[in-house]
Each structure stands twice: as structure tokens, then as C-alpha cells.
Amino acid sequence: MSVEATAQAPESSDLGGRGRPKFLAIDFFCGAGGTTRGLLDAGGYVIAGVDKETTCRRTYVENNRNHLLDGALPAFLERDIFERTEDYPSGQRSELVEELDVLIGNARRSHPGVPLLFAVCAPCQPFTTLSRRTMSPERLAKREKDRNLLQCAADLIERYRPELVLSENVAGIRDPRYGGIWDGFATELSRIGYATGTRLICVSAFGIAQYRKRSILIGARADVVASTTIDESDGRIVVPDRDDASPAKSVAEVIGHLPKLGAGEVHAEVPNHRTRSLSALNIERMKFARPGETNRYMADTASGDLSLECHRRVNARLAQRCFNDVYTRMSADRPSPTITTKCHSISNGRFGHYDMDQLRGISLREAAALQSFPDDYVFHPVERIEPIARMIGNAVPPKLAQFFAGYLVRLIAGAARS
């Protein structure tokens, strides 16, 4: 079965009428709610989000009221999903299971026949390339433990037997140096009775104005999945690599409508339209940075050589130019680079605004838009930059979650029709 034959976006009629959702959902590691917003937009009813980060609670709850059934807010379960042990006293697995038993049990009884979806988008930091030498022993220990999050999630999947599973993570999670965690998660799901499929995709192929490579894993219980969605060559679910109904978008298309700002300014009416302040030297650099070009410009400007001394030393030692994207601007007519937790800082990547009349990095609102959050999605606390940038950079793009939730629903809808 070809990918092209299955990678159609859901029709609006697929998203359920008023009242009855297409699926119920629990969003594990929900953060600020990117996945949850996508699930809601796909016609789902989100029962709860699970995350141990207190700072995400207000943003998650206030932006994600359910559209269907009772219109309630999803519960925010502030829990650590690991078991409590003598070596790890902060684990809250028992408390979480008690809460989920009640919430899922009530939802299943109240809405029989509506499938349950578990979204499992674990924190990506354990699978990124930050040098181990730069981490404290405590941070290194936390990263090592966090690599077990998918196994913890698999245990919960085995307990509750949701019909559908959606997982997203960084491209690097597939790297063998992480011990086969991604393939191991798929193998564990297969063991407990799920058909699965995985694929490396770029979110720009799903109508999101950003080059962001992600690993996608989808699963459906083998007793409910349509056989026509299984690739006969390997027995796996076909995972689309694009949404043909969502054309590619450029940076200008997505953020060009937002009001102009200067560095360090805040817009009085547009929520989170706030930029980081810049030094006089960095403002001078931005005067000469042209959209889409490297930072080679800094070596020869009307104001002299504006290159960083540390960069000059590294370039000379390695006999090649490094750090080409810092202190540069995005292209207006292409997707943005990956929006990271440092997306507000021009010294951490190609995060300068494409408009040369605006001597600044992109705002938090613009970063959220490039992640496909709607403009009325308000991140809290609104007066802060760093915590909101972390929420935005760590989020699953809502449009990506929306597409794959809709696709998963069709996998089992096809089985019901056959």
C-alpha cells in the first residue's frame, strides 16, 4: 500500500458533530499543550494532560477547553510517571494510576464505542546532542532516567489498552547510541497487541512554516486496525510523510501580519508579541544581516569587522567557517529553521526577523505561530521570556498532532466499515 494513497487530511465531516467526539484522549508529557490543541482540532475530547512541570499548568488549561460534549477543561495531572522508590522518592505512578482509573473509567462508561487515544510525546532532551561534558552529574542522571519514559508509558498503555497511540520525538531518538529506545518502544507495543509504524518526517510537509525533522510513531490495537492500512512488505502501519491537503507555508505567510516591533519591545494588544532586548553591537550587526544569508557579512561591514573574536579563533583553528547561522535573519519566502527553546535569541541560531527594518530577533508570538499555534493561544506568565520560549520550543506543533490524530482515527474507522 503506498503512502500517497493513505496520506489524505481528514475531511471536516470526519471531525465529529457537536456533542460526540471522534476519540477520547490522554496527553502524556503535555507541556504547554501543543499536542492537546491538535487533538482538539482533530475532533477529539481531551480528558487530561499529564506533566510534572507546574509552570505549564495555566497555559495548558486556559487554552484548551474541549469543543465537544460538556465543553469542560481537560484535567491537568501534575504527576511524575515513575514509580516511587527509595532511590527516587519523587515518583508518583501510584497516584497517577488512581486518577487515570477514575477518569478513563468514567469516560469509557459514558461514551461507549468512542476510541481512546494516548499521546506520548516524551521530553526530547535525553535524545539531543548536547555534550555530556557540559552537564552536571545531577543533570546527566536526570537525562539517563528520562530515557526510560517511553517504557513507563508502554506500561500504562498495557494497563488501559487505548485503541490508538501517537508518539513524536526528535530525529535523534532513532540513533543507535541511545540504546534502540525508539525501536524498543515499537517492539513493546507489538508485544502487547498493537500494530505500529514509524517514520522520520519534516513538519514543513504538513503545512507548518518550519524545517523541523521529527520521528513519528503511530500505533493501533491489532484487533481494531484496518488491514488495508498495513504495508504488506513489512507488516507495519503506513506512516504518511506529508499532508497533501496542506500546502507548504513560508515565514512571511505565517508571521507577516503581526505588528512591527523593536528589540526589547512588547505589543500592548497582541499576546506574547514580545522580543528580547539587544546590545548596541548586536543591533549594529542586524543592520547588515540580510534575509537567508550566512553571517559572513559580519567580517566586512561599513562599521568594520563585527565578527565575534571567539568565532574568528575557531574558524582559524579549524580552517573553515563555523557557526554560520548565528546573528542572521530568516528567509521570508521559506520555512523557518527549527524553533528551539532559544528561539528568541539571535546568538543561538537563524532567529533574526526577515524584515530588515526590524532590528531584532523574532518575538515569542512569532515563534509560536511558526510552531502553528493560533494567535489567541496565550502563554503564561506573559511578562516573561525564557519560560515561554522553553514551552514553545519544546511543544509539538499543533497542526502535526491534528493531522496524525485524524489519520489514526481513519485507521480504525476503515476496519469498522469493512
Image (cartoon, helix red, strand yellow):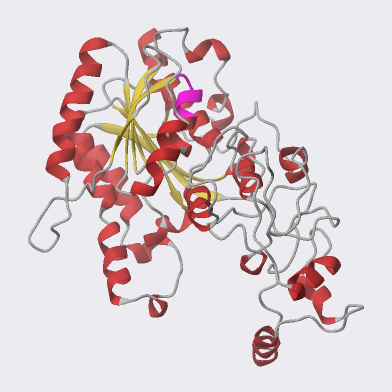
Between 213 and 35, the residue placed more toward the observer is 35
Residue shown at 26% from the left, 39% from the top: 189
Question: Is 42 included in the stretch rendered in magenta?
Answer: yes
Q: Is residue 55 above or below residue 176?
A: above
Dominant SS of magenta comes to helix
Answer yes or no: is residue 418 visible: no
Task: Give coordinates of residue 383: x percent, y percent.
Answer: 55, 50
Residue shown at 55% from the left, 33% from the top: 399
Location of residue 292 by image quarter: bottom right
Answer yes or no: is residue 219 visible: yes
Q: Which residues are magenta?
A: 38-43
Question: Is 408 included in the stretch rendered in magenta?
Answer: no
Number of on-image labels: 0
Q: Is residue 129 above or below residue 408?
A: below
Residue shown at 19% from the left, 41% from the top: 155
Task: Give coordinates of residue 88: x percent, y percent.
Answer: 14, 60
Location of residue 267 by image quarter: top right
Q: Is residue 200 left or right of residue 102?
A: right
